[in-house]
Structure formats: structure tokens, C-alpha cells
């Protein structure tokens, strides 16, 4: 799980990809929780909160409150 500071260092495309991955993870956890149960039910809670964090970072970027890294990275 990336922290908010780490996500702000990513480009918008990377953050959106992270949101897609975490959303799929949340879907699978929810499905598994409803059918057979989870060994660690707190994983569902952690995943939900991570999705919320990512969406918050994207919204802050959209509103101009906190800028994400630009698309051109130097390697």
C-alpha cells in the first residue's frame, strides 16, 4: 500500500492505475468475503480505505489543492 505522500509523487496515470488495481482487489475481497469468508476480515476495511485515499489524491489534484508529479520523469 502506498502512502499519500508516495502517491503524490506519482503521475496521474500511475495513480489512476493504482486505483484500478485496488478497486479490483476490493471487488475480489468483497466477493470472497460474501461467499466463503476471509481469514483476515480487516483486509476488506484496509482496501476500502486505500481506495478512498487514492480518490482523495485524485480529487485534490483536480481541484488544484495538491499537484501530482508531471508526466515527464527523469531517469
Image: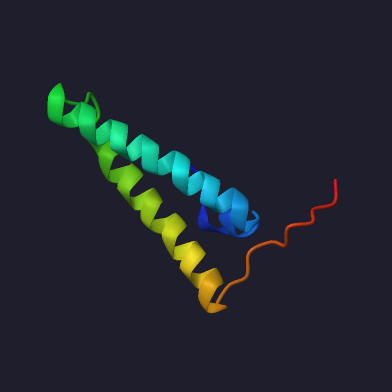
Its colouring scheme is rainbow
Q: Is residue 69 above or below residue 34?
A: below
Front-most of residues 47 and 21: 21
- The percent coordinates of residue 48 (x first, y second) are 31, 48
Front-most of residues 44 and 28: 28
Q: Is residue 64 above or below residue 20?
A: below
Residue sitting at x 27%, y 44%: 45
Q: Would residue 2 be seen by someone viewing this image from the given angle?
A: no
Residue sitting at x 48%, y 42%: 1
Q: Quadrant of residue 10?
A: bottom right
Residue sitting at x 30%, y 37%: 27
- The percent coordinates of residue 40 (x first, y second) are 25, 29
Residue sitting at x 47%, y 69%: 59
**Left or right side of 5 for 44:** left
Front-most of residues 17 and 68: 17
- The percent coordinates of residue 8 (x first, y second) are 60, 60
- The percent coordinates of residue 16 (x first, y second) are 53, 51
**Left or right side of 31 for 62:** right
Residue at the extreme right of the image, as rendered: 75
Q: Would residue 32 be seen by someone viewing this image from the given angle?
A: yes
**Left or right side of 40 for 72:** right
Q: Quadrant of residue 35?
A: top left
Q: What is the total number of numbered labels drawn onto the structure image?
A: 0
Quadrant of the rendering where the C terminus is positioned:
top right
Amino acid at each position: 500500500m502506498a502512502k499519500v505522500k508516495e502517491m503524490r509523487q506519482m503521475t496521474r496515470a500511475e495513480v489512476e492505475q493504482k486505483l484500478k488495481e485496488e478497486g479490483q482487489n476490493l471487488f475480489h475481497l468483497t466477493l470472497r468475503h460474501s461467499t466463503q469468508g476471509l481469514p483476515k476480515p480487516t483486509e476488506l476495511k484496509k482496501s476500502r480505505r486505500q481506495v478512498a485515499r487514492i480518490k482523495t489524491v485524485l480529487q485534490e489534484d483536480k481541484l488544484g489543492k495538491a499537484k501530482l508529479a508531471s508526466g515527464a520523469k527523469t531517469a
